[in-house]
Image: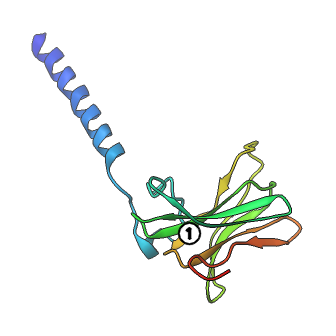
Amino acid sequence: MYVLGGLLSLGIFIEVVLAVKDASSGPRCLGSSCVGLDARDLRCDSKVETLTSKTTRGITVELRYSPSCNASWAKSIVPVGSTLYVQDIKGQEFGHYIVPPDGIMTAHYGNMGVGKELKACVRLPNTQDVCTIIAGSEK
């Protein structure tokens, strides 16, 4: 009986140790392997920087950057149906995320693009785009 209880306790201990180890491990992508994916799901959302932001007609969009993942994404509080994305200097868009009717009234986040030489954009439901400058470029 004591052996069974000891084994059960050992099994629970091992599960707890594995769960803690999994929760503390680092990012799950780097650079191009992050493109189009969610920063939080891939553990790129800690120690991030806001590289640039822009406010136009009450809409603020930010370019968020994760040094540990070498990836960036857009952050904004926008209406349902808006699309958050990042764009490179050549005009290629990455990380499209359409804001769902989820009832969340705080910021939503686009998916990732590679590096930090990007601009963050939001395409509002009326097709108007609001974008930052390319990070690191002159205004």
Q: Is residue 82 above or below residue 35?
A: above
Q: Is residue 108 above or below residue 1?
A: below
* x then y, percent, for residue 16: 28, 32
Q: Residue at 45% across / 52% down in the picture?
A: 46
Q: Is residue 4 above or below residue 21?
A: above
Mark 1: which amino acid? Answer: Gly
Q: Quick check: 53 left or right of 24?
A: right
Residue carrying label 1: 36
Q: In which quadrant of the rendered image does the C terminus lie?
A: bottom right
Is 120 in front, or is 57?
Answer: 57
* x then y, percent, for residue 57: 86, 63
Q: Residue at 85% across / 72% down in the picture?
A: 128
* Secondary-structure class at tag 1: loop
* x then y, percent, for residue 23: 36, 43
Judged from this view, the residue extending furthest toward the top is 1
* x then y, percent, for residue 24: 33, 45
Judged from this view, the residue extending furthest toward the bottom is 90
Is 38 in front, or is 90?
Answer: 90
**Badge 1: how crowded within 10 Å, few (<14), some, or many (20+)?**
many
Judged from this view, the residue extending furthest toward the front is 138
Q: Quick check: 31 left or right of 106?
A: left
Q: Residue at 73% across / 56% down in the picture?
A: 99
Q: In which quadrant of the rendered image does the N terminus lie?
A: top left
Q: Quick check: 8 left or right of 89?
A: left
Q: Quick check: 30 left or right of 136?
A: left
Judged from this view, the residue extending furthest toward the right is 126
